[in-house]
Structures are given as C-alpha cells and as structure tokens.
Amino acid sequence: MHDVSRLDLFLTEACNLSCNYCFAADAKPGAISTTKAREGIAWLMKSRSQKVHITFWGGEPFLLWKMLKQCVAEAKSAATDCGKSIGFSIPTNATLLDEEKLNWVAENGIKIFLSIDGAASAQAFRPLRSGENSHTLATEGLRQALRHKNLPAPAVRMTVSPQNVTALVESVVHFVGEGVSELLIYPAYDSPWTETELKRFETVQNQLVEKVIELFGTLGHRSVPQLKAWRPILRRLY
C-alpha cells in the first residue's frame, strides 16, 4: 500500500512532430511494453486513496492509439474491482485528433490538454517530421475539440521559445479568434536564451500586456482566455 494517487504513464517518446526545444528530441523513439503499463496500473491500484488519476504522456500519446484504449479500459476495470474512482488526462499536440478519438475521449471522461504554439509563424518551429508546418493540422484538431458537443473546452499550452517569441502576441490573438477559454503560456526553460533573446522576451511580454488590455476593452472579459500560467512571468517583470 502507498499514498500516491496520480500516475504519469509515459507511453512513448516518439512523436510526429520535430520541435527543436522538446526535452525528448534526442531520445530513442521507443514505447512502453504492455507488461510495464499493466504493472504501473496495478501499482496505482494499491494506493490508499479512493480517487486515482493517470496521465498518459509522450512524445505524442495518440501515436499509440491501440495501447491508449487498452490501458484506459484495463485501468477502469481495475479501479472498479478495487472500489476506486479513476480519472484520466492526455496532453497532445492535436494533430492526430479526429472524430473517432474525440468521441472516445468524451465517452471515457478524459481531460485533454492541447500543446500548440499558436499562429502559423510560431507553429513553423514545430514542424511535422516531413518538415511541413504543423499549423493546419493542429488548428483543425483544436477546432474539432472545441466544437465537440460532449467535451469540455480543452486548455491550450503554448511554449515560448527563443525562435517563436516574436510571434507571441499574434499567437494569443489567434487563440482568441479560435475561442480558446484557457491559455497556458510557458517559456521554453530548457532552451538556451541569449541576453538579446531575453530582452526580446521582456519586450514582447509588455506588448502582450497592452494587447490583452485592448482585447478586454473590445471583446469583454468573457471572450479573453484565462491566462493563469502567465501570472508568474508578469510578477517577475513588474
């Protein structure tokens, strides 16, 4: 028995994108075995907590679509046998989302988080493995998730890197236009930032403050996404 109630299950480090700031960019694209996944689920069920949660990580978790479905089904069954309630979440780059996957997400009460960097100029630094800009696929996945009648609106996590920092304001405006209700803005902490790039980051943050104030004035607070993860950045700048 133990007191841990949440399990991060890394299904694979493989991804259909090639982001230059990714922590797994140099990792071998392996996948977890079915045996290891089952061992992780069985271990979580030994928790003293009556509420447990599993987050499926990648790489891109939806590359292992069959395993995802199997893990969720077996975890739900195991939780029922143990008298526990269980929740799930999946971070995804949204490029593989379609009606079938979103219906499954909704049917199983899974919370998805969309990792998208924004406008085409920002998303260009998150290319597909083929080298093409992933903006069109990511935006289509975002739209399908936002419009799904049985899904709560997903939060979007955007990463600000030295390469895409100048597109930050444009990207936030892009997400406002798409109807995103919660936007999480995080710097790429693992990327090497030069003094010039950090200064540019500060300048762009000030520009974003002005844009957000403008959006509140023109659209009203209900149409501007929540920006909770942005607050620590603002506290350091002001």
Image (tube, grey):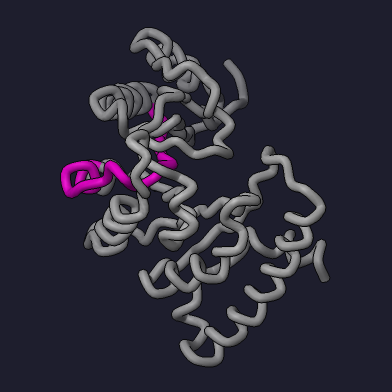
Quarter assignment of residue 165: bottom right
In the rendered image, the residue lying farthest to the left is 100
- Say if residue 151 shows up in the picture: no
> Which x, y percent locates residue 213?
62, 84
Side (left or right) of 36 relative to 149 = right
Q: Nearer the viewer, residue 152 or 16?
A: 16
The quadrant in which the N terminus is found is top right
Relative to 3, say whether 172 is above or below.
below
* Magenta extent: 83-104
> Which x, y percent locates residue 25?
53, 28
> Which x, y percent locates residue 212?
59, 79
226 drawn magenta: no
- Say if residue 201 shows up in the picture: yes
Q: What's the residue at 40%, 35% (across, down)? A: 86
In the rendered image, the residue lying farthest to the bottom is 217
Q: What's the residue at 73%, 55% (across, down)? A: 197
Relative to 151, say whether 96 is above or below.
above
Q: What's the residue at 66%, 75% (across, down)? A: 207
Side (left or right) of 193 relative to 99 = right
96 drawn magenta: yes
Q: What's the residue at 35%, 59% (across, down)? A: 152
Side (left or right) of 93 relative to 5 = left
The quadrant in which the C terminus is found is bottom right
Side (left or right) of 113 relative to 20 = left
Q: Nearer the viewer, residue 94 or 9?
A: 94
Quarter assignment of residue 29: top left
> Which x, y percent locates residue 121?
46, 59
